[in-house]
Image (cartoon, helix red, strand yellow):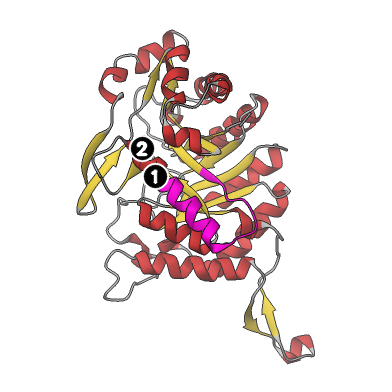
């Protein structure tokens, strides 16, 4: 039987407002570590974090992921996604390898161009300016990613200083983590980008929105995206089996607290929405909110969920560690039944 890996995806919000249990940057970080520990104890497979700059959210993933690595032993740790427009590829290669070595090879890095940010072209303030014909920095993100991937693969990145080394030659970034190259995921928002991802030999990370719309339900469009990715992967002849994750908002109504916060929202958010993003149509996937038995039936019919090997569950982190630990344990139970259900024809 296919067993879906379940990870949580936290945006790491904090705000000092009534109802928030995460009121500062420190609380957001410390609670993220505690939630990863609780998630591992509940049998959850992954702890993933969204990276946003110039906002009260998680921004620097590697200290956080390293801290989680030191407190856990089994759970995958990752990002969904790092906006590569903001990154120094060689510095990131050092940070990623160090984090992966601390974790014993559990790092799963989701990278991409990122989504709309609170800052206007904030990556320029970080010192990265795209070419004039690269309006939103997409080429910049792909260029940074290419250099980063070459660096973590051990390619030479600088010439040796003969006075220091006693030899003429070239130097790779250190430390190196041997298999990290196989655990880089690209966040793809379209079917064409998914095909490009396969051509590059990266795993596929697909979120709760696609920046295109063909009129079919979200899960069907995303399932087509996954199929195109896998088909292109086979055509490329890559030896390893790729991984595919999809993100979902899933809230099992299991007690008075979950009913209080989310019971009414189920009626509004239980269907796809189509809107405008980055100058074009985008389709946003529905939320899954309801009694566990209802969620089993609905998720078993979600074509993209059934095709993915990993589902990242977006968590309302401002409700605190205990609430989200209970939510994740309930989601894990739901997926035990989803995996056992016959696939929809």
Q: Is residue 102 magenta?
A: no
**From what the image shows, is residue 174 above or below residue 290?**
below
Labelled disc at residue 220? 2
Q: Of helix, strand and loop, which mostly describes the magenta segment?
A: helix
Q: Nearer the viewer, residue 240 or 275?
A: 240
User: Residue sitting at 59 percent across and 49 percent down?
Assistant: 108
Secondary structure beneath disc 1? helix
- Report which quarter residue 206 is drawn in: top left
Is residue 88 at all visible to an observer of this figure?
no
Q: Residues within 10 Å of mark 2 (few under 14, many from 20)?
A: some
Dot 2 falls on a residue whose secondary structure is: helix
Q: How many marks?
A: 2
Most distant residue in the front direction: 345
- x and y percent of residue 172 in the render? 67, 75
Residues drawn in magenta: 225-244
Q: Which mark is residue 224?
A: 1
Eyeballing the image, is 226 above or below 197? above
Nearer to us in this view, 197 or 96: 197
**230 within the magenta span:** yes
In this view, the residue farthest toward the top is 256
Q: Quadrant of residue 96?
A: bottom right
What distance separates the C-alpha of mark 2 from that of mark 1?
A: 6 Å
Quarter holding residue 173: bottom right
Q: Give the image location of residue 283, x and y in percent.
A: 27, 41
Of the pair 25 and 198, the residue shown nearer to us: 198
240 lies left or right of 11 = right
Tell me the residue at 37%/63% (across/down). 123
Are dots 2 and 1 in contact, CB under 8 Å? yes
Q: In the shown orientation, is residue 40 left or right of residue 220?
A: right
């Amino acid at each position: 039987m296919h067993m879906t890996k379940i990870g949580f995806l936290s945006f790491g919000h904090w705000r000092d407002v009534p109802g928030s249990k995460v009121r500062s940057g420190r609380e957001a970080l410390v609670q993220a570590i505690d939630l990863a520990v609780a998630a591992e104890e509940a049998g959850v497979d992954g702890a993933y974090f969204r990276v946003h700059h110039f906002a009260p959210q998680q921004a620097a993933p590697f200290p956080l992921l390293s801290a989680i690595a030191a407190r856990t032993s089994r759970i995958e740790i990752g990002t969904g996604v790092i906006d590569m427009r903001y990154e120094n590829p060689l510095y990131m290669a050092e940070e990623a390898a160090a984090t992966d070595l601390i974790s014993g090879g559990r790092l799963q890095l989701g990278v991409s161009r990122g989504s709309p940010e609170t800052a206007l072209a904030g990556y320029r303030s970080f010192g990265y300016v795209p070419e004039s014909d690269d309006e939103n920095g997409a080429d910049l993100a792909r260029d940074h990613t290419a250099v980063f991937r070459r660096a973590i693969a051990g390619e030479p990145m600088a010439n040796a200083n003969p006075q220091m080394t006693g030899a003429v030659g070239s130097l790779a970034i250190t430390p190196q983590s041997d298999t990290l190259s196989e655990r880089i995921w690209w966040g793809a928002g379209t079917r064409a980008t998914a095909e490009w991802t396969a051509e590059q030999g990266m795993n596929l990370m697909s979120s709760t929105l696609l920046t295109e719309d063909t009129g079919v339900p979200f899960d069907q469009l995303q399932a087509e995206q996954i199929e195109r990715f896998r088909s292109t992967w086979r055509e490329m002849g890559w030896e390893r089996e790729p991984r595919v994750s999809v993100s979902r908002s899933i809230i099992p109504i299991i007690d008075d607290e979950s009913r209080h916060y989310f019971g009414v929202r189920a009626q509004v958010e239980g269907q796809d929405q189509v809107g405008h993003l980055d100058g074009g149509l985008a389709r946003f996937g529905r939320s899954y909110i309801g009694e566990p038995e209802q969620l089993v039936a609905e998720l078993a019919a979600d074509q993209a969920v059934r095709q993915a090997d990993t589902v990242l569950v977006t968590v309302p982190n401002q409700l605190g560690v205990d609430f989200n630990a209970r939510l994740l344990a309930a989601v894990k139970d739901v997926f035990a039944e989803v995996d056992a259900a016959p696939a929809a024809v």
